[in-house]
Image (tube, rainbow, N blue to C red):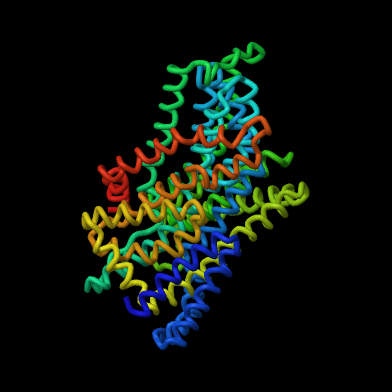
Amino acid sequence: MDIRESLDILMFIGLVVALMSGYPVAFTLGGVALLFGLLGIGLEVFDFGYMAVLPQRIYGNMTNDVLIAVPLFVFMGIMLERSKVAEDLLENMGRLFGTLRGGLGISVSIVGALLAASTGIVGATVVTMGLLSLPTMLRRGYDPALACGSIAAAGTLGQIIPPSIVLVLLGDTLANSYQKAQLEQGIFTPETISVGDLFAGALIPGLMLVGFYILYQVWRAITDPASSPALPVDHSMSTGDLYKRTLQALIAPLTLIIAVMGSILAGIATPTEAAAVGAVGSILLAGERISGAKRPVRLAAFALIALLVETSYFDLRIARADLGAGAMLGILLAGVLSLAIAWGLFVSLYRLWLNGVLNEVMQSTARVTSMVFVILIGAALFSLVFRGLGGDDTVHAFLTSMPGGTVGAVITVMAIMFALGFFIDFIEIIFVVVPIVAPVLLQMGIDPIWLGIMMAVNLQTSFLTPPFGFALFYLRGVAPESVTTMHIYRGVIPFVLIQIFMLIILAGFPALATWLPKVLFG
């Protein structure tokens, strides 16, 4: 092994050790890269010219249209969290299913899926459901382990069910890796994949996971009735009122989910444009719940949906020569709808500002977005130095030498990412690990969409696995004192096994991830 190979291996080990020591991630990435870059220059095995590419990399990331979706989806998730959507959903779903044995656990799984499709932020979902559902489940006699496992597992669905921040970042990184892999193979007109492809690919596996969670809840209720008792029937509310309240709680988030995901899957909007629709929709939803002025907000929500529908049927571009009477009428209608949306937004934002909600949401969005992009800059510097030290060749030689060929290489990468998920957040794994290993795997002929969904489910599994899963720490932070850490660990084990079972199914049937993108996007 020559000096360059030794340095790139030591560089990766040094990064993992530094991250586990608790240093800030972005500065750790940049600091380790600079240290080993200077060491490589001193040993005359690293060309400083690699560093000259860094400004272009940063500029490219800052002007990347796909990554604009990150702050928009973050804003959407935080705004929905502040607007008490989760409280209404949990309360009404609990009433609807609670009279069944295991009903509270089923309602947690369903609400977790809805929140995942609305917010895509794992920590917020786990904490919210832990605060709202866990005390109720314990008070009603639920087994503490089952209650904790249900909440933690449902909270991690935000990793895989679109629109997910994980899939947005993973889609952009995999697109670059896929193009690089094709260029390495001599394909100079490379194909590409989009975040929309990953969203479509994740839909079936994500819904299957929700189904498996619910089946497990039903099985526990049948085999161990004492672990998940039914709630007593609430005679103060009629069945009709119960259905009406549940429907009212569901309509707004479901409409937003359909508007965001439907516009992507129907090809009406790109993920970034859909994220903007989601951000606007979340403002209107929060304004409707918090402010007293319901009519302008509801009118704006209707106008937003109508504008999306009109966009799918009419060409609304003004700067074209063939503007007929029908086109002018469509453009005029779009203008009226836009004014209605603007009025509803103004009313919502003003009321949210008076209530102090807007300021909180803006600050939280700025903090999360800044963290993502600062880590992205550090990861860009790390990858440049790692490649300059010959890291790509080392990884390629390592993976291609695995017994079992392509299967062995995939299993090795999944095992490494699973282990790193205990100690490193998904953002670092996506920005640091994926660009290193993905080009090698994609050169072996692996479908990029299937690989992306496998990585997402794998990361979701590691975030749920004791003793270091991130979701467990989130839940531990809000759980009552009566709930021990061992309750949480025991409760998540069955759900971890479900996740692993899902990975095995995906490995055996790749079409679960690749079929829908082919149908929708060809």
Of residues 188 and 123, which is closer to you in this image?
Answer: 123
Of residues 284 and 118, which is closer to you in this image?
Answer: 118
Residue 297 sits above or below residue 328 on the image:
above
Residue 1 sits above or below residue 222 on the image:
below
Location of residue 131 (image quadrant): top right
Of residues 444 and 8, which is closer to you in this image?
Answer: 8
Residue under the point 22% across and 56% down:
403
Residue 319 image offset from top left, x and y in percent: 45, 68
Residue under the point 72% across and 54% down:
359
Residue 198 sits above or below residue 128 on the image:
below
Residue under the point 43% across and 86% down:
43
Residue 174 image offset from top left, x and y in percent: 37, 61
Residue 76 image offset from top left, x and y in percent: 58, 50
Residue 50 image offset from top left, x and y in percent: 43, 83
Residue found at the very far front of the displayed protein: 1
Q: In this orientation, does residue 257 appear?
A: no
The N terminus - image quarter: bottom left
Relative horizontal placement of residue 397, taking residue 281 as reference (left or right): left
Q: In this orientation, does residue 211 appear?
A: yes
**What is the count of numbered marks?**
0
